[in-house]
Image (spheres, rainbow, N blue to C red):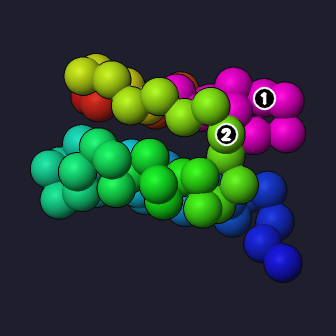
Amino acid sequence: MTTLIQKINSADSIAALWRSGHVAAISAQEALVGLGFYAVAVGETRIVAWLNGCRFEMPAV
């Protein structure tokens, strides 16, 4: 079972791939949902997702 820190690190890696253009937005969204995140929104400048009642925002900077 993955720990919370592993899930967050994986989510950050997915966001980095999305930012670099290696992963399409829909693929990033599906990958985050697969990790257990919900209400995932992939916009032009950031990915916003919820996990365990906490909001995570990964900017595209």
Three-letter amino acid code at the position of disc 1: Cys
Magenta part of the chain:
48-56
In terms of image quadrants, where is residue 55?
A: top right
- Which residue occupies 59% across, 52% down? 33
User: Image quadrant of residue 34?
Assistant: bottom right
Q: Quadrant of the N terminus?
A: bottom right
User: Residue 29 or 1: which is nearer the viewer?
Assistant: 29
Q: How far is disc 2 from disc 1 in space, using C-alphas? A: 10 Å
Q: Position of residue 22 (x, y in %)?
A: 17, 59
Q: Which residue is mark 1?
A: 54
Check the picture and name the quadrant holding the C terminus. Answer: top left
Indicate which disc, 2 or 1, sits on the residue closer to the N terminus.
2
Q: Residues within 10 Å of mark 1 (few under 14, many from 20)?
A: few
> In this image, 20 relative to 55: left or right?
left
Q: Residue at coordinates 24% horizontally, 57% vertically from top-left?
A: 23
Q: Is residue 45 above or below residue 37?
A: above
Residue 24 seen: yes
- Disc number at residue 38? 2
Direction bottom: furthest residue: 1
Magenta stretch: dominant SS?
Answer: strand
